[in-house]
Each structure stands twice: as structure tokens, then as C-alpha cells.
Amino acid sequence: MSLELTESVQKLVDGLTESYSEKLIEVYNASGHTYIRVEADALLDIVKFAKEEYHFIFLSDIIGVDRYTSEERFEVLYNILNLRTQDRIFLKVRVPEEEPVLESLFSVYRSANWLEREVYDMFGIRFNNHPDPRRVYMPDDFQYFPLRKEFPLLGIPGSIELPNTTPDTE
Amino acid sequence: MGIESALGEGYLTTKIDALTNWARANAAWPMPMGLACCAIEMMAFAGPRYDVSRFGSEVFRFSPRQSDVMIVAGWTTYKMSHAIRRIWDQMPDPKWCIAMGACASTGGMHRCYGVVQGVDNFLPVDAYISGCPPRPDAVIHALMKIQDKIKNEHSVLLDT
């Protein structure tokens, strides 16, 4: 596999290989970006490592993916940036359908707060030690996760309440 | 200048219904419910180019207590529908409702779980406007249709 990495990303990959070689699953380029897939249990340590040692100080986005396979159904992407060299990488972890739980990155990046809430809202992936694990878009008592593949496009009839249209009568 | 100087000596007979309907039809103050791109067209409808004050409807009150026509301009989520219904309930009777554009009328291109597929699911709509977004002329047309409707109402005395 030939990889074309920028200098600072190469340094990060080298550093990860040195310290976390058994947690590193794959590194590849696609669409002009670098993707690093790691084991879910080492995610927090790896993110801390990338932030403190390699200046990847900005968590720009968290993306949930429903792969809809029988094993390791969900995937979560963390888009982090090095603000000195303007390099961007995507860290990936996979989580199983039965127990979709990850460690929250809130202790490392404050922006993880809302981003993780959004992933929870849409995919039902829970985050341990999240300070405020509420829904963002859907009503609080909504029971489903709309971006899961089995969720019907038009929703489940009656699952969200419409206003009462006869407020003046009993 | 009072009405006396315009009419001179004499008097005028009419039905009270005709008089109130005439007054209501020509002073239908809109309650703007701007939720998306349609709201920009709705603003143009009140602005100088289309000048809806010709029809007595230029007074956007932003207060439901002083409004007669609610213009729902834009797509309505289930979460927002409760706010819209609350504002509608605060408007005094008689009141009318315009569903402006494809989204407010039918959900439009937002055929998904979060968007109400037409505001007539929770509001009594009097006029639907097609288009995405409709031109301000189309909003004026809807307003004129509502004026026609108001003019044909038995507003004060009921037939017995």
C-alpha cells in the first residue's frame, strides 16, 4: 500500500505505529484525505495523543455511519485538524449493533458535546461520560433513531405528536 | 374630511354583513410565519415593489393578537408545529390561513420523518399557494381569494 502523506500526518502515523501499533487497524487515503481506523477501546488515548503530541487540536466533526452489516454495524468518524499545518485526518472506529457504546471525547475536545449528542440522536450510539446526553433534533420522548437504515423515510406514523387542533373543547 | 362631505346630504343603506365584510376584507393584517425561503418572497409581497398595502394588508404585526391572516411560509417540522398552533390559537376570530408554497401545503421536497406533510394536518387552511417558492404575485392572488371569501361570509347575523 503506497501512502502519500503530508509531513505532519506522516509524523502522527509514525508516532501511532510506535505507541499504539496493536490498536491500529488500517491507514489509507481516499478522496484526498487520510483515514486511520483504530480499535474503539483505544480511541480516547489515541485522540489525546494526537492532540497533545501532534497538535491536532480541533475536532471539526463527528459522523455516524450505519454500515448495515451483521458485524460491527456502526461506524463513527472523527474529523480532526492540525491547526499549525492545516492537515486534516479522519479517525474511524466501529461499534457493534448490540452494544453501541463509545467513550466520550468531551474531556479532550469541548466541541464533542453537541456532535456526540447529534450522533446519539440519529444513530443511537451512546457515549460514556458525556456531560449532557440529550437529543438534539428529535423530541425527548422519541423512541427511534432516524438515520438507522431500517427506519422508514417518512417516519413511524403517530411517533411524533401533532398539536391539539381543538384546544377550546374538551 | 368626514364622510358627510363626500356624500353630501342624505343617507346610505346597506346590510351590516356587507359593511363588516367590506371592512374586514380590506384590512386583513397578516401574521407572518416565516420558516424558510418562502419568507423572503413574503417580505417582497409587503415591500414597495408588490405593495400589498393596496389591499390593506401591509401591516405585518408580529403579534398574533392584532392579526387576521396567518401566512405559513416555509416547511414545518413537528417540533415547530406546536409553536405555530399556539400562535394560531392566540389570534382572535375571525381568522384565515394561507399555506404558502409546496412545503407548507404538502411537505414539498421534504418528504421525511421530521417535516409535517402539509400544515392542514393541524391548521384550517383557507388558501394554498403552489410554487417553490411562489412569487409575491401568487401571495397577492391568495390574499385576493381570501378577500372574496370574506366578502361572501355571513359574519354578523345568522340566517334563522
Image: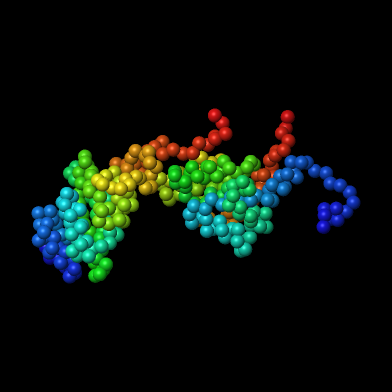
Looking at the picture, does residue A105 appear above or below residue B151?
below
The structure residue drawn at horizontal position 76% and vertical position 41%, both measured from the top left corner, is B16
The structure residue drawn at horizontal position 39% and vertical position 37%, both measured from the top left corner, is A159
The picture quadrant where one finds residue A139 is: top left
Percent x, y for residue B156?
Answer: 72, 38
Looking at the picture, does residue A74 appear above or below residue A35?
above
Q: Quadrant of the C terminus of chain A?
A: top right
Percent x, y for residue B145?
Answer: 63, 48
Which of A120 and B157 lies nearest the eye of the viewer? A120
Percent x, y for residue B146?
Answer: 63, 47
Q: Position of B17 compared to B115: left or right?
A: right
Which of A112 and A118 lies nearest the eye of the viewer? A112
The picture quadrant where one finds residue B41 is: bottom right
For residue A30, say whether it is visible: no
The structure residue drawn at horizontal position 33% and vertical position 47%, both measured from the top left corner, is A132
Q: Position of A147 compared to B3: left or right?
A: left
Percent x, y for residue B84?
Answer: 52, 45
Q: Position of A89 compared to B116: left or right?
A: left
Q: Quadrant of the N terminus of chain A?
A: bottom left
